[in-house]
Image (cartoon, rainbow, N blue to C red):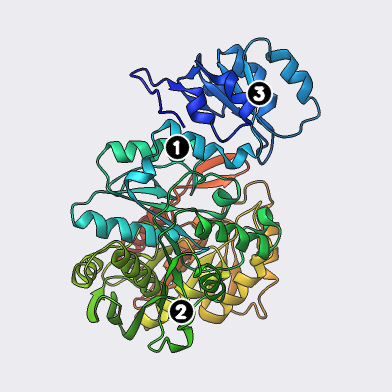
Amino acid sequence: MQQNKNNKNGEVALDFLLEGFIDDDLIEQCRDVTVNALVQDNRKARSGNLFIAHQGYNTHGLLYAQDAVAKGVTVVLWDGDLENRNEILDSISNKVLCLQCHDLKNKVGAIASRYYEQPSLSMNTIGVTGTDGKTSIAHFLAQCLDAYDVHCGVLGTLGNGFINDLHPTGLTTVDALQVQKTLAEIKQAGARHVVMEVSSHGLDQGRVSGVAFTTAVFSNMATDHLDYHGTLDNYANAKRRLFHTPGLGAAVINLDDEFGRTLAKEVRDHVCVWGYSLKTDVSEYENLADYFVNTKEIVAFERGYHLSVATPRGDGSFDIPLLGRFNVSNALAVLATLLVSQFTFEKAAASLSAVHSVDGRVEIIAEPGKPVVVVDYAHTEQGLSAVCQSLREHFDGKIWCVFGCGGDRDRSKRPLMAKVAEQYADNVIVTTDNPRHEDPQAIIDEVMSGFSSLDDVEAIIDRRQAIDIVITNANKGDVILLAGKGHETSQIVGDVHIAFDDRRVARELLALREAEAVNGGGAS
């Protein structure tokens, strides 16, 4: 392969970009052609660009190729069947170079990686996948790595950039072009490490193809996103792909998870597996991993845990200022990944002792003389179960749970979340989450069908009113869980985003409760 001819104007030789990705007889047509940007959105197309057109989730890029050509793109790279494909290609092939690239969806990332000079190869690139815990693990890792002045980039649900300077994208994993562009920017800013949350959608749609992951982390598997994947097997297969990334050095896998054990067994023949577990005895897992990180003792206190752990790099004890056994599991994932990244045990333990909770992940709002409010992103039955059980460890009072389920998403989990709430909470209010294009009452009705008794359950469509009711009625010593939206600052109704932040609303209503108490009203 010839060298990249990237110049000061950002122009790159087309044959360099596409060699090995298109048929050899097409490469000759690329000689002496350069492009100055890669685009998939015709609205962003400009003169000299390479326009990439393949089948997306909802539409085919070729439908927008004529507009991209009208805006001056130099090359159209395409793939896939489309009823009027030949008509479209005939209309533009005399104006620009049109090249077919088989399986283009899964090659876009690798092509973009070449364009941006393969940024992931120059960093310790860590991918985190799983149903729950991706954001927490990624941010805890970034906090720990940043603490030792090694500057760690982040790509994920809360935004892309650096831990104290994140730019929201609205997606856990952005498209393949943006992934590579962001990695290049993070590298240019001096990062030596980068942690990526890798969603099942991102894996299925090839958004992380071309990323040279050093370490892959698996948190857990629960029922989610079946609206997209169709079956749990398809969902699991999407997650698997991260662990078959060419050149992957290590896999950090939760052995307390059934699918995690299956995954560890499958990938151990081609990658070094670090298994982590809350169990004190991991002898039953000895054939699943090369190295183990596990707890020897877990002691809860009001705002965290004291942990004693065993690792291949030494044993020891430290505290973590986090609530929930799931966060103990997340901490073990971080500990193992830090050890893989050549941290000493002492340095890894010290950095974990200083982490702070992630926005909207078991985020505590506590004021003297009032019930404690906990805001969490739990939006699956497994996530809700984990956070409810954790609150039992740290608080003695009643648990009040407010939650809903998102519209246009997996409907099968709705009654399952009700069963979890009924099992672990003392009082439950089912309310609106992000209804999107579904009727909020219809969503609530599906949730309500999962309760065996409605004695301590109420349905309130208006989420603010639901939060108001629990804050008004809960007593000092009780804990109120606002589940499902976490860090989100809006509620999606139809296609409209309406400002709504559980944390802000909770603080406002707690302040109102205090004012009412001063005037002789409110809960005791």
**Sequence-first disc among 2 and 1:** 1
The residue under the point 39% across, 72% down is: 523
Foreground of the two, 234 or 361: 234
Relative to 122, say whether 218 is above or below: below
- Left or right: where 518 falls relative to 416: left
For label 3, the SS is: helix
Mark 1 vs 3, N-terminal side: 3
Three-letter residue code for mark 3: Tyr
- Name the secondary structure under disc 1: helix
Q: Can residue 395 be seen in this view?
A: no
Q: In which quarter of the image is residue 308?
A: bottom left
Residue 403 or residue 281, whichever sits in front: 281
Q: From this view, report whether residue 394 is shown above or below residue 13.
A: below
Residue tagged 1: 113
Structural distance between the alpha carbons of marks 2 and 1? 43 Å
**Disc 1 to disc 3, C-alpha distance:** 24 Å
The amino acid sitting under disc 1 is Ser
Crowd class of label 3 (few under 14; some 14 to 19; many from 20; radius 10 Å): some
Task: Look at the image and tell me whether residue 376 can be seen.
Answer: yes
Image coordinates for residue 361, horizontal then vertical, percent = 40, 62
Q: Mark 3 points at which residue?
A: 64
Quote the CA–CA distance across marks 3 and 2.
50 Å
